Image: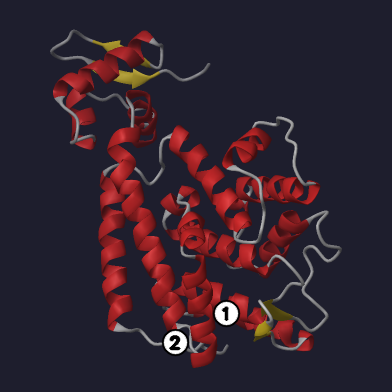
Amino acid sequence: MAQPPFEISSFILKKIASIAEKLGEVNSAHLHKPPPELRKRNRIRTIGATLAIEGNTLTEEQITALLENKRVVGPQKDIQEVLNAIKVYEELKRLDPLKIRSFLKAHAMLMTSLIPTAGKLRTEAVGIVRGSEVAHLAPPAWNVQHLMTELFGYLKKTGDHVLIKSCVFHYEMEFIHPFMDGNGRMGRLWQTLILMNEYPVFEFLPLETIVKKKQELYYGALAESDRAGSSTRFIEFMLEVVEEALADLLSMQSRVMKSVDRVEYFKSVVGENGFSRQDYLRHFRQISPVTASRDLAEAVASGILERLGDKRTATYKYHHPS
């Protein structure tokens, strides 16, 4: 197994430390599984951004309509791209980031009805043209299977930090360019999958919206790494993207997490066990005792919780469907 070339710069170490700190804040704020409203919105933003980078013209409103099975008027190719992306992002948890079989399955879903070779490694030479220049000439087709096998071997066997591995995979996959089309969206998708396998918050963290916002810098980091023969610059760029996405999530958490979101989340903490208002407050330190009481009272009134005992000694349990 070949080790992809890169260096651990002081910038990379600083970004990993910052990201680790923010992931700790995300967990303490119970955002590793964001509220349903935020999950849906971020999924729409992710799909819109990753496809817009590739030239898709549909708006977030149109993507929302397609997600809700409503009719949309627009270019058929763009609609098909969105429908495919919705399907593959819904299947994320069933894909294994360490298996090339899952990788090909994801590409098949992402590119079905768009190219005849969906889900198949390329058998022809390809180059990436930007403007009037060839920006990148991919390795020969006969070597693609071997290179991708080595890259998945790196994912499975290396001791590198998962944040680094996800960036390295993203860059190396783009360099290999294993498919005739859909490589960019697959690189971004697979980085998300590698990260969410370790940190669940990444399932609904729209990294792609920041990449879209910094699209020229994204291409620049790819090109700079190509010239250097090392993915160091691309790792630095993508770690900045991850850090910014986590900072955005933390900045909006106080506005997004509502009473019903807290109650829904707390079910995953206590399961079938009883709990007190103090237990609830220990998990939601940012709310007041009055707010905690209101959350629990509303959940009892709506039938989500059952209250046992009087106000002073009350305990609560989640109702389970019979």
Q: Is residue 221 above or below residue 73?
A: below
The residue at 64%/48% (across/down) is 91
Residue situated furthest front in the rendering = 132
Three-letter residue code for mark 2: Phe
Q: Is residue 304 above or below residue 136?
A: above
Real-space Cα separation, disc 1 to disc 2, in angstroms: 11 Å
For label 2, count other residues whose C-alpha is less than 10 Å away and answer few (under 14), some (14-19) or many (20+): some
- Picture coordinates of residue 288 (x, y %)? 15, 26
Number of numbered labels in the structure image: 2
Three-letter residue code for mark 1: Glu
Q: Quadrant of residue 128?
A: bottom right
The residue at 74%/88% (across/down) is 143
Residue 6 marker = 2
Question: Which image quadrant: the N terminus?
Answer: bottom right
Could one spot residue 281 in this view of the protein? yes
Q: Is residue 81 above or below residue 160?
A: above
Counting residues from the start of the chain, the first of labels 1 and 2 encountered is 2
> To which residue does mark 1 refer?
172
- Picture coordinates of residue 312 (x, y %)? 13, 13
In the rendered structure, the answer to whether residue 151 lies left or right of residue 292 reads right
